[in-house]
Amino acid sequence: VCELTATDESAYDPAFHPDAVPGYPGGYPSALKFRKLELVGELASPRKWSAERAALYTLVLELVDANTEEVYHVEGCRVGFREVVIRDGVLTLNGKPVVVAGVNRHEHDAYTGKVVTEESMRRDIALLKAHNFNAVRNAHYPNDRRWYELCDEYGLMVVDEANCETHGFVLGGGGSLPMCDPRWRAEVVGRVAAMFERTKNHACVCTLSLGNECGYGPNLRAAHAWLRPRTRLPIQYENGVKDGDCTMLEGDGRNPIVTDVICPMYDSPAQIAAVAAEENAAAPKGRRNRRRTGERPIILCEYAHAMGNSGGGLHVYWDMFWSRDESKGLQRVQGGYIWDWVDQGLVVPKGPLPAGVCNSPATLHQWKAGDDGMPAAAAAKRLPPYWNDGAWGYGGSFGPDSGEVDRQFCINGLVFPDRTPHPTMSVVKQLQAPVHFCALDASGLKPGVADLVTVRIENRYTFRTLAHLEFHYRVSSGNKAAPVFESVVDLETTSPWSSPRNSGVGKGGLTVYPGDETNIVLNLGSAGAAAAKTPGTWLTVEARLKRSSCGGLPAGHVVSARTFTLAAALPAAVAMEHRALPQVAVEAAAAGVEADYNRAHHTLTARSAGFYKLEVTADGSGTVRLSRDGASGGAGLTTASTHLFYRPVTDNDNGGAELLFPFLRKWYRYLPPGLGLSDTFSYATQWRSLGLDSLQACVREHAYDEDARTFTVVEDHASSASGVLFTTTSRFILRRTHVELAVEVAPRRALRRLPTLPRVGVEIVLPPETFGSDAAVVWCGGGSDEEYVDRKLSGGGVFGPLKADGRDGGSSGGGLHTPYIYPTACGARTDVHWAAVVAKGSREGLLVAHATSDPKPCAPVPFSGKGQWRADAADETAVENPRFAGKRKRRPAGADPGTFTFTASRYSVAEMDVAKLHTDLPRSDGEAAAALRTESADVNAPPGDCVLRPLRLQVDTAHMGIGGDTSWAPQTHDQYLIHPTAEGGSWTYSLYLQPLPESVFEPGAGGTVSCATRSCH
């Protein structure tokens, strides 16, 4: 308990004096007098507030009659004690350097717009804490008062930002005008003052921002001069520049006067590394350091623009944030704030709302159910049975003059409007995790002798030990449905160098202090150790909460996890020969295969008794009919196979000068290649100008080699705009149990103009009659969530079964298809060894594996960015100088050698590429929904099929990254691109296609593809 004493009650606070700085619009009436009353007390050794431990005290103020001791009034609030100081250019909280895992958050609700409830705030905080965020930037205005109280309570550091922004002036070339015109001075200073006075006593407010993108000038300096003597908190502002001049659009966050934090937005990791190196230079001795070199931390106020399918390259930033390498100045690179939290989409009802019905979930459901007085049958007809009661709309979705120019640029969050996380969130969570599993040492694992492995862990908390966590681990094998072995280690009771098989409990346990690393020994048991000899075995380690936390997280919540490979899966070619793929008999020899080649009809028909039937037509249609021999009729397993070099463009692919000047799209193709505009125009414009989105296949020749049992088809892939761009050679090699499709892709000279290709692969079309609504995909390798070469988690395993079509908005219960509001390429899984599509209803399945003899992808380099390649650089340059990544490669960095990337979707590339909303995509409801649609006479349904559509399995030997630094320029890091004219000149790979035997679907068929899975999570 601490009592406060009033002192100096006659002192005026110039903040409220009407004749002082005109800090409030219009000023206060001179009749009012504002006095400052200080209450002073001392609390010995208070518990400090932090995002890890939100320690709060209750402050009670009583107004008491001095004579009668009658209490006139009582006020109370929660307060916290914390110290935020910049020391030696490093931001510290309570004396400790802190890494900012932040996000920009707009107040937004899908139904009520900017009006948010406390329930919505609590839901946001729970999600933020669950995904290891510790900070929020209030973008770009002071938030609801309750938000600060909740951030105090649950532990989130807040950047409080004044509502100053001048984008409207930028369009007229005067972005800094309000900061320079004296008529705006009172308004600018007043908004900063109001922001500060309103929340100055909240422990969560750790940084103050003067505004966002509103230029620079004397008015901003006046606001800073008003604020600086009133607080010791760091002040930040991005829109200035280091030379102190005014800005037209963006600054560099390095103005020496108004910002204590170097806070750029959207700098690449390479740019940040360069700034850190410059700031690391010592200031000249004996001279005033006017530029404040080396005095300020570097924290990005915005980075990793999360627009649609984005987040590529996040790991490059976080490798830097966690580095703390003082020789490169990285100790002052302390994190940033991702842009941004939520897709700012609004629900657009499918039909006109009657009078008195609000656009809210409850009333919309009531209306649909007929509870508003209309019969339920009629209510069902007036609301079409789409996957949502309403689509999430964006600019232009609400009629004329509703922001068509803005398009989907507010659909750039980490979560959908209903707060369902985007796939990027799982990667963000792991990168920001306060516990890092560094490495696995399995050298001591000797089955039958020693069942122990060692995992090195690092405590990345700022203040906490790991005593509140326990470590769960399990061994999984590719041919087992359940973990082979699982157990738990508690560091408080178990010594790191003991195991349950030996002594079990170490005396005193182990304390891992913040910043420390240690080894923990895991006993895999005899079963786990024996499984470790089997190809395709993985160890997953998880740090879980022992009990519920003050952040609202339940006991058992996974704070951090990592999967290590104990025994790598075999390459596909070796696995086929050794029958090591899921329990399926495999033989490579061609004995027993019957083939009939009809040159006049351009067809090959083949049969391998007991295994498969094949029909290939070499007429440019891509007809490839593969079926299981012995299947009773049906549509077979495949109907077509075509080469793919284009993907539905992502928001990042669309980023370029054309965003501001759309007319440039049609002019790009006429510009000379030598102008070097590949970094100016979007990838999408460059791809389409050459016709990658409209390639037509023309068969040049085909032949059948009886001795080699090989049918060869050579095709040219041409566009009307550029002629032939690729020549492909496809060899269908008839094996005893499977068909090998060996492919060689030769790029043509016209592709030299492109900085990258989207993909190199094959699309295999699977008929809906065979692979209906119960069709699911199982795969080995990579991870369970959507992943790309520049956005993935390390790991491996067997995942699925997962349906291909999760289509009910952000609340989808699952599926390989990710329903981004603006449809884009999605659903990819990378580092995959094999994938199988199974349908229990038809008792059919298809296994696809991949192999390549091409040179392996280059190793990822640190601190990369756009434009970091040199055509003449040697590979070792990547080690000597991280600004360069060696020679350009045909395959992107980050992909495991020999693996492939695949997607499975009910939508074609062309359908995804032209859709502007997810509800624009053709319906794919299945038979039951189609019957309901017919009965309801739904005339308002969008065009497309009302029955289940073909399943398109897209298998890529190379797929470029998705990028994520920005969405308005082609900024995918060069090391994650596919360079079409790199050395080597072509891509070669093989796909192995094998029908699954009917025995896979027999009840109790242990170890087969249908059950050799574990649930995705």
Image: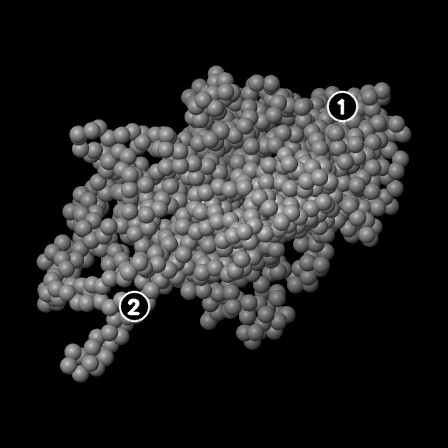
Q: Quadrant of residue 968?
A: top left
347 or 500: nearer the viewer: 500
Question: Badge 2, how many Cα within 10 Å: few under 14, some, many 20+?
Answer: few
Residue bearing the label numbered 1? 712
Residue 627, placed above or below residue 402: above
Q: Quadrant of the N terminus?
A: bottom left
644 over 479 or under it: above or below: above
Q: In this view, does 39 lie to the left or right of 536?
A: left
Could you say whether the residue bearing mark 2 is in a helix, strand or loop? loop
Name the residue beneath numbered marker 2.
1
Badge 1 amino acid: Thr
Along the line of sight, the residue nearer the viewer: 799 or 266: 799
Callout 1 touching callout 2 (CB < 8 Å): no
| First along the sequence among labels 1 and 2 | 2
Write the residue at 71% across / 50% down: 482
Tell me the SS state at disc 1: strand
